Amino acid sequence: MVGRELAEFDFEPQGMSETEGGSERARPIPRISIQCFCEGAEVAEVLQFAAEDRRLTKAHVSIHMGGITAAVAHYQESPTPNLIVVESRLPRQDLVGELDRLAECCDAGTKVIVIGQTNDVLLYRELLKRGVSEYLIAPISPLQIMEGISNLYNDPDSDPVGHVYSFIGAKGGVGSSTICHNVAWTLSEALTSNVIIADLDLAFGTTGLDFNQDPVQGIAEALASPERLDEVLLDRLLTKCSEHLSIFAAPVVLDRDYDLSADSCDMVLDIARQNVPYVVVDLPHTWTAWTKRILVQSDEVVITAAPDLANLRNAKNIIDLLKSIRKNDTAPHLVINTMQMPKRPEISIKEFEQAIGIKALATIDFDSETFGQAANNGQMIEELNAKAKATAGFREIALALAHRREVRVDKKSPLASLAPFLEKIKIKR
């Protein structure tokens, strides 16, 4: 029944802002060393801004002044890094001559990005002949330089790195896990894309219960030896819940301690995102080095809050922190859960939004009967009741995270009769 109802809709990419579009193209940079030599403070400031971005956290970036002349002097006595970024305001012939001097000092395998002032096709061809990897024209933005570096170290012909969406509650017990699981299921069903849910609440996680699964192994084994994790082991540790949805279940036993390291979490999520388009992380309501790093490095963050004062304070603190650190990313998303609970004083949505400074992505009304029945059955809300009010909210969240929008197919449209034929052509391709 659910499949048929989903088929009545089409999904198309949603228009993205320049920041969001750049974020999509600039993929995480591997552990490389990058040395930059600038002539002006403007470019140096942009490079410093980019160096602090989450996509370059693994790279070692150093910024110097003096342009190509300083770079040549430096590398006459020191080995070259993986990547050199140089800014030059010289005219074409002088710039080419300076780059020839730099080439004499470079080790084999070093890549070079040049930031220049001239939009000149002949200059661009000359630079390519001399092995320059990329030529950018000032003024540049942080996202431009990140995209340029990403293109050098991520194979454009390979499958794109999957997106990581993290869910956390502003307070314990606000339903963040329920929101997370339903949104992940909706992503997998609506977009027919493979999704992994990583349950990092190792002691008390509910992913297994919510999907009526009792896996023997899960994410704890991966985190214990992250260096051993590969595609084969990942497949063995995952529990398949549907055609497109798998879970990395928590062990939910209390006879051992769970002192996770941020690096282990990084490695496990990196392997997972290399194998599926979407990794949805269910974070516990706790504040540690590894939860903070996952939130900072995620592509999108969803904060679930109930409409009371403690939730408002905590949500505002998390949002303000992430906004200050993730300057090149969209703001975290807010979901207000359990609205209109009987006999409970509530902060209105308008007041909540004004105090936090962002608009809620979705509001989910209190519905103990539907949510309780779904939890007891090990089902998602749309599986239990496709017409439940919360179903539209979960779909809205899922499509917003994936930057898609829902387009209802008009059955009276002349093109509607061609839909099955067009679908067959797409499948054959």
Image (spheres, rainbow, N blue to C red):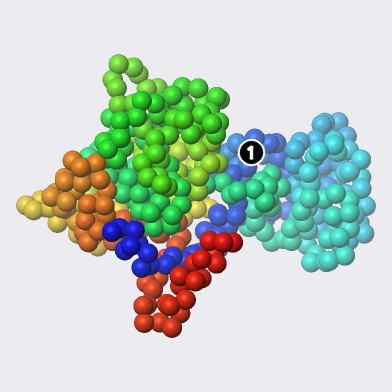
Residue furthest to the left? 343
Q: Is residue 208 left or right of residue 161?
A: left
Q: Is residue 263 left or right of residue 175?
A: right
Residue labelled with disc 1: 30
Q: Secondary structure at mark 1?
A: loop
Q: Quadrant of residue 230?
A: top right
* Quadrant the C terminus occupies: bottom right
Q: Residue at x 75, y 38 (%)?
A: 82
**In this view, 284 is above or below 137:** above
Q: Quadrant of residue 143?
A: bottom right
Q: Above or below — where is 421 with respect to 164?
A: below
Residue at the spot 63% in from the left edge and 42% down from the top edge: 29
**Residue 266 spot, x, y in % from top left:** 51, 34
Label 1 crowding class (10 Å Cα cut-off): few <14, some 14-19, many 20+?
A: some
Foreground of the two, 317 or 395: 395
Q: Amino acid at mark 1?
A: Pro
Locate the N terminus and report the quarter of the image it occupies: bottom left
Residue 57 in the image: state x and y as whole percent.
58, 39
Q: Can you see residue 149?
A: no
Residue 123 falls in image quadrant: bottom right
Instruction: In this rendered view, identify the residue nearer to me: 154 or 115.
Output: 154
**Residue at the image point whose x is 64% and y is 35% from the top:** 31
Instruction: Please tell me which residue lies in front, 63 or 349.
Output: 349
Residue 393: where, in percent of width, then height? 29, 59
Viewer can see residue 248: yes
Q: Is residue 115 left or right of residue 386?
A: right
Residue ID at (78%, 50%): 133
Looking at the image, residue 162 lies above or below residue 217: below
Q: Position of residue 368 (x, y in %)?
A: 14, 49
Marks counted in the figure total 1
192, above or below 154, in the image: below
Give the residue at the far top of this rendering: 255
